[in-house]
Image (cartoon, rainbow, N blue to C red):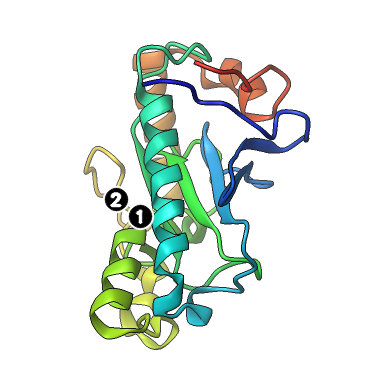
Amino acid sequence: MGMFKNKGSDFPGVYYQDEHTVTIYDQYPKSIVHLLVLPQKNILNLDSLGPQDVPILLEMKKTKDLIIQHLSGPQEPKSKLNLEYKSGFHAIPSMNHLHLHIISNDFLLVKNAKHYQSFNSSYLVPIEDIILGLEENGRVENYAKMREIKEFDKKDLIAPDGTNFKRAFKKLKDHMAQQFYAIHGDYQIHLPLLLMKTEWKYSI
């Protein structure tokens, strides 16, 4: 795969940086791995995007794909975990700088149903959909006005393995922890990696 050089290794909180993007650790992680890809260019949010921003979105997608490939590859030394990943923009973001979530599919650190649903519903918008909308229509959908976005947190809670827990968040949490433990053991031993108490920053 070549060199994956973390140019941001001297800056706490930075996982990876290149000419066009910077990837940081989410300050309030919801999973074992939770990263944010930001453009170096100052872009406020999805509503600020226009056709002229497709090139930087393509760079963000490139970074996202590279990081997921890196985390999923056999050369990844941080752990023996075989995690799956998803990514996307929140339709209504939590901070005023465009950021793309990369998150592992364990969700062991979510604290409420709304946070869980924000990553497991149409509220999480793939970057590919944003790029396609700009290329075909010259604009991004107004997700804040869409009914399914407004009501995303009212739907049943579906675990990553497809089990439906209706609205029983604690049962969902217990199920996900049990599933993780059966495969990987106690997830607590992996949290120092998440909290940057060990070294994630290296080249391959």
198 vs 39: above or below: above
Secondary structure of residue under mark 2? loop
Q: CA distance from mark 1 to mark 2?
A: 8 Å
Nearest the viewer among 49 and 111 is 49
Q: Which mark is residue 120?
A: 1
Residue drawn at point x = 39 percent, y = 51 percent: 61
62 vs 130: above or below: above
**What's the amino acid at mark 2?**
Ile
Nearest the viewer among 44 and 116 is 44
Residue drawn at point x = 38 percent, y = 70 percent: 152
**Horizontal placement of 53 versus 159: left or right?**
right
Q: Which mark is residue 158?
A: 2
Residue 75, given in percent of the width and then of the height, sits at 41, 12
Q: Is residue 170 visible?
A: no
Secondary structure of residue under mark 1? loop
**Horizontal placement of 70 versus 187: left or right?**
left
**What's the amino acid at mark 1?**
Asn
